[in-house]
Image (cartoon, rainbow, N blue to C red):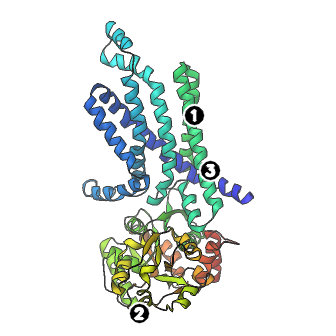
Amino acid sequence: MSGFIETLAGLGDELSAHVLLSASAIALGVMVALPLAIWAARSPAVARISLGLASLVQTIPALALLALFFPILLSLRAVFGEGLPTLGFLPALLALALYALLPILRNAVTAQANLDPGVLEAADGVGMSQWQKLVLVEAPLSAPFIMAGIRTAAVWTIGAATLATTIGQKSLGDPIFAGLQTQNWALVLAGCLASAGLALLADNLLGLVESGLKQRKKGLVAAGLLAIALGIGGALWAQFGPDRPEDRVVIGAKGFSEQYILARLIGQRLEDRGYAVEYRDGLGSAVAHSAVTTNEIDILVDYTGTIWANMMKRTDNPERDAMIAEIAEWEEQMSGTLMLGRMGFENAYGLAVTQDLADRRELTSIDDLVRIAPSLTIGGDPEFFERPEWIAVRDAYGLRFGTQRNFAPTFMYNALKSGEADVISAYTSDGRIVADQLAVLDDPRRAFPNYDAIVLVGPEARTDDVLLETLRPVIGRVDVALMREANLMVDRDEDKRTPAQAARWLAGKIGL
């Protein structure tokens, strides 16, 4: 229990970032929705089109809406320059503001449409101008209904903002996603509880303002707005106050345990050297690589096969040293990103089955799978079946499985043990391969490329000689046995360690 409370108390940074993101998105949604509602109240065509578009946005899953702004903003760099952020706060703000639009707009339009015609005629009768009628009559009468829409939008936005983690924006989604990947349920619960508590608090404070508007009690309105302003002010202080270091090294990590551990291994070393460090966890492969090449993050541990097949679009499979040399040259030419070196181990994709199935069906290589694949279910992480590596393996061996299912990386191994899947796309440095007695099938046709773990340093961060000097001792020091052991510390069901604890253990083992 004390561990959970300690975890919850340690979410101040994520909470303040979450407050600022949600408040900004709601404010932007209000700024767009209210003028549109006034226009829509005077034009049925505008009302139909604007409400239709806002409803259409709501049909798009929030996660997809957030992700879609990455390519949109990337393409807009041709107009606004390379400084336009493609990850983090800006895309999250735009996506969440769109998501907040519908309830505010619909309530405002409905409120305007249901105003008492007699009151409006009386306003005309005393000679009010259109502006006076809007400010002195329509706005006060519509305000409680509009505030109800803002309350709904606030609850939706605060909940959806947890998904901003996937595009590199710090939020209360950070502990939720990290906890899901490492099966640290205290972390998941702490993130959910903080997000739910924030949504309830915002709803109650906005409800206080709504009651004040209905009852014409200025004190209630002022009390609600003052409490909201104090909360936002506190979040601003926490994020931008004088105690906060201006220059931080931002380390990115994809959404699985190994990435969290290696990010902490590097981060702890930088902190010992006096750097302030910030983590961007849970990034997808394409997003993470784009982030480091565009200075959205400073450091990333990536894998050669991922860059080779997905970013460079190469289909050949050269020897390890030749591949790394070409990747280093390509990164240098394309973005100025530095490939600092390989960490010393490989985390390749492999097709794994239980040892029992391997023995019963005499499976030793992927070739052996071909004859029984139509009767089996294969499970992979959400990226796997869309990656060119899988397509290359599938076509090289002629694999046709009966059923194909997606699992979060950390749940694939449970799926194999429980019989939900017969074959999974395992990671060869995962400690659960040995712990669960799994058999990784040989790849005699070398359809999977090499996946050496390498350290990438962004174009701006690479100019910091002290930072590079601090990172270099990590290069070539981590072998696959140590990495498996560290991964298992985080992934096992009992006596679990956090990624930070596993990173400190790993640092001790390699003498850092």
Q: Secondary structure at mark 3?
A: helix
Q: Is residue 16 left or right of residue 326?
A: right
Q: Secondary structure at mark 2?
A: loop
Q: Give the numbered dot on residue 444.
A: 2
Residue sitting at x 66%, y 60%: 186
Q: Quadrant of residue 38?
A: top left
Q: Position of residue 257 (x, y in %)?
A: 56, 71
Amino acid type indicated by mark 2: Pro
Q: Quadrant of residue 208?
A: top right
Q: Nearer the viewer, residue 237 or 325?
A: 325
Q: Position of residue 339 (x, y in %)?
A: 41, 78
Residue sitting at x 34%, y 45%: 56
Cα separation, mark 1 vs mark 2, equals: 64 Å
Q: Secondary structure at mark 1?
A: helix
Q: Nearer the viewer, residue 377 or 309?
A: 377
Q: Nearer the viewer, residue 174 or 478?
A: 174
Residue at numbered disc 1: 205
Q: Give the numbered dot on residue 193.
A: 3
Q: Quadrant of residue 435?
A: bottom right
Circle 2 crowding by C-alpha within 10 Å: few under 14, some 14–19, many from 20: few
Can residue 68 be seen from the camera position used here?
yes
